[in-house]
Amino acid sequence: MQRRDFLKKAAAGSIAAGTALGASTAAHAKAEFKWKMVTTWPKNFPGLGTGANNLAGLITEMSGGRLTVKVYGAKELVPAFEVFDAVSSGTAEMGHGAAYYWKGKNEAFQFFSTVPFGLTANEMNGWLYYGGGMELWREAYAPFKVLPAAAGNTSVQMGGWFNKEINSIADLKGLKMRIPGLGGEVLRRLGGTPVNLPGGELFTALSSGTIDATEWVGPYNDLAFGFYKAAKYYYYPGFHEPGTTLEAIINKKAYEKLPADLQAIVMNACKVVNMDMVAEYAARNPGALQTLLNKHKVELRSYPDDVLQQLRMASQEVVAELAKKDAFSAKVYASYQKFLEDTVAFSTVSDQAYLNARAENSA
Ligand code: CA
């Protein structure tokens, strides 16, 4: 090939490439798909609502505006606890919440949010992404024409806010506490009355005495809701939610209308937010706890060892009974439990051993 011919061809090639790029840029500027995302959180609520905002923003940005996602806080389009149905029916193409809110559909859903004394955030991600969890989760939601994705994790939560000390298991008897999912069943087993309320209703319920106690998330979120104004004691650890996975749920039909690149953007944006939220909580919880203790004079309390031991025994019973409800629950339980056992065996010589060593060295 003559040099001149080569240059000519190269120039023609670059013009063709430029045209193609120009055309695709023009296409990117136009929204081909406009989605609504309904959420169980108050609009813009720190960590949770902002996580949903991040997810919508990432999808819109990574798709170059071809797929835009508009976020609605709880009650803006549908109430918090109607998010799943709204996505299932196609009222909204997408939702952000947590699987245990939909346990009325199938109790096995709870495994995909959190299990008392179960997996931590990092371990949940291991189970979901590499341990078979995601496949089971997709199977669980398939009858509802909803696709799930992990899209956030709170890490270990706090035990909750109380106006009396918990010195023995008897102190839980008759206690009316907001505590969702399997943790609520554990409380019921020990004589308490669990109630579930959306986050946005908790402060009023606690201040008015409609409930005696509440858990929510951790210091960063609990500070934002101002629970320190309505309760004296802040208990730890959140045995009931050791690493709650938040979910993005997607209407299957809407997802299938997307070209493959936009589908990949949606799923990978979920993964980014799933990981990013853990980092955000790791950064913000320590300072928020100091503010609660030093500025708002909250009294921090640990559940006594024997209380935790009884909570653990009750938790194992509750989870094992859930496994007996039906064949699908048994299958999810078997997968989860195997992963948990393997993880516990490893974490005792890794994370737990290290954290114990670090705590002793800093004492
Ligand atoms: Ca919680």
Image: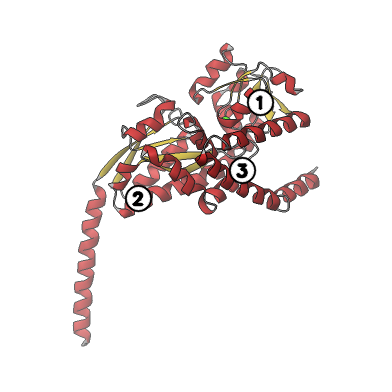
Q: Nearer the viewer, mark 2 or mark 1?
A: 2
Amino acid, disc 1: Lys
Residue placed under numbered mark 3 in the picture: 119
The spot of residue 272 in percent (x, y) is 47, 48
- Left of 342 or right of it: where is 124? left
Residue placed under numbered mark 1 in the picture: 295
Amino acid, disc 3: Leu
Viewer-closest of 87 and 45: 87
Q: Are marks 1 and 3 in contact (CB under 8 Å)?
A: no
Residue placed under numbered mark 2 in the picture: 263
Q: Earlier in the sequence, mark 2 or mark 3?
A: 3
Q: In 3D space, how far apart are the residues under numbered discs 2 and 3 (Cα atoms)?
A: 29 Å
Amino acid, disc 2: Gln
Q: Quadrant of the C terminus?
A: top right
Q: Quadrant of the N terminus?
A: bottom left
Q: Are marks 2 and 1 in contact (CB under 8 Å)?
A: no
Q: Nearer the viewer, mark 2 or mark 3?
A: 3
The spot of residue 119 in percent (x, y) is 61, 43
Residue density around tag 3, few if under 14, some if 14–19, many if 20 or more, within 10 Å: many
The spot of residue 188 in percent (x, y) is 63, 23
